[in-house]
Amino acid sequence: MKMVNIKYFVLAVAVWASGCTANHNGDYEVLHAGQLRDIMHKNDISAKVAVDSLLERPGLFAVGSLDGLSGEIMIEDGVPFVSKAKGDVVAVSKDRDVAATLLVYAYVSGWEEMQLPDSVVSLEDLEIFLSRLRGADSSGKPLLFRLKGKPAFVKFHIIRPLAGHATHEEIRIAAFSNTLEGAKISIVGFYSEYHQGVFTHHDSNIHMHVINEERSKAGHVDDIRLDGNVKLYVPAE
C-alpha cells in the first residue's frame, strides 16, 4: 500500500514540476449525444446524431458507438474513422454518412504538446495524471486530450450488433477484441469525473479510441501500457 501511495505522490510531483497544475480548460465545449446507461440498461441503441451534420464545422474530435451497435467511430480533426468487425475481419472507413447512438465530441483548433513522465505507464496512471491537469477546476467540464506515439501495447475492441435485447455482458462478449503491440498510434480521449454512465463506464473516468498509423485498425481502448514513448496533447489555452 505504501508503494502505491509513493507512486501516486511521484505522479503529482511530476505534474507540478512540468508546470501542469494550471487549469487546462481552453474555450472549447464538450458535448455528447446519447448515454451509456441507456445503451446498457434500456437497450436503447437508436441513432442520436448524424455524423455528417457535425462535420460542417472544422476542428471536430469525437469518440463513440454507431447506431445499432454496428461499430465504433473516432473523429480526428474532422476526419471520421468508422470501424466495423465481421468475424475476425476489421474494416476501417472514412464514411461520413453514419449515425451514432453515443458520441462525445468537441471542436478544437489548437493543441499544446506535453511529455508524459516516465512514471505514467498504466491506464490508471494516466487517469491520475489527467485528474491533476484539472487543477483546481470544479466546474465539471470534461477534458479532451490526444495521445500519439508507440506504446508497448493498446488493447481495444469493436462493438458488434446483437439481435434482440442484449445485456451488458452479452455485448462485451460479442465484441471483437485485439491488441496493437509496439505500433505507431493516435488516440482521441475524454476525461471526466462527472460523466460515469454517460460517456464513460461506471468504473472509469476515461473514454478513448485508438487508430493505428496504417488506418487498418481502430476501436475503443480497453487498456494501454505507455512505456515513455507517447506524448500527450491538450487543447491550447
Image (tube, grey):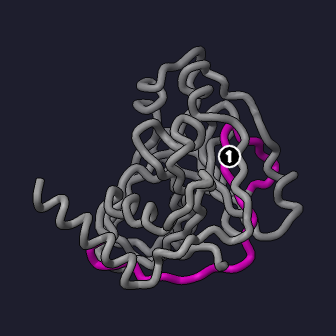
Image side of residue 145 versus residue 51, left or right: left
Residue 12 in sight from this viewpoint = yes
Q: Which residues are magenta?
A: 95-119
Q: Secondary structure at mark 1?
A: strand
Which quarter shows the C terminus? bottom right
Percent of width and height locating residue 149: 44, 77
For badge 1, the amino acid type reads: Leu
Q: Is residue 116 magenta?
A: yes
Image side of residue 92 versus residue 136, left or right: right
Name the residue at 58% across, 71% down. 24
Quarter of the image where one finds residue 30 = bottom right
Name the residue at 75% across, 65% down. 107
Q: Is residue 201 magenta?
A: no
| Residue tagged 1 | 103
Percent of width and height locating residue 112: 59, 82
Residue 179 in sight from this viewpoint = no
> Looking at the picture, does residue 198 appear above or below residue 165?
below
Name the residue at 45% across, 75% down. 184
Percent of width and height locating residue 207: 52, 51
Percent of width and height locating residue 166: 52, 19
> Looking at the picture, does residue 1 appear above or below residue 188?
above
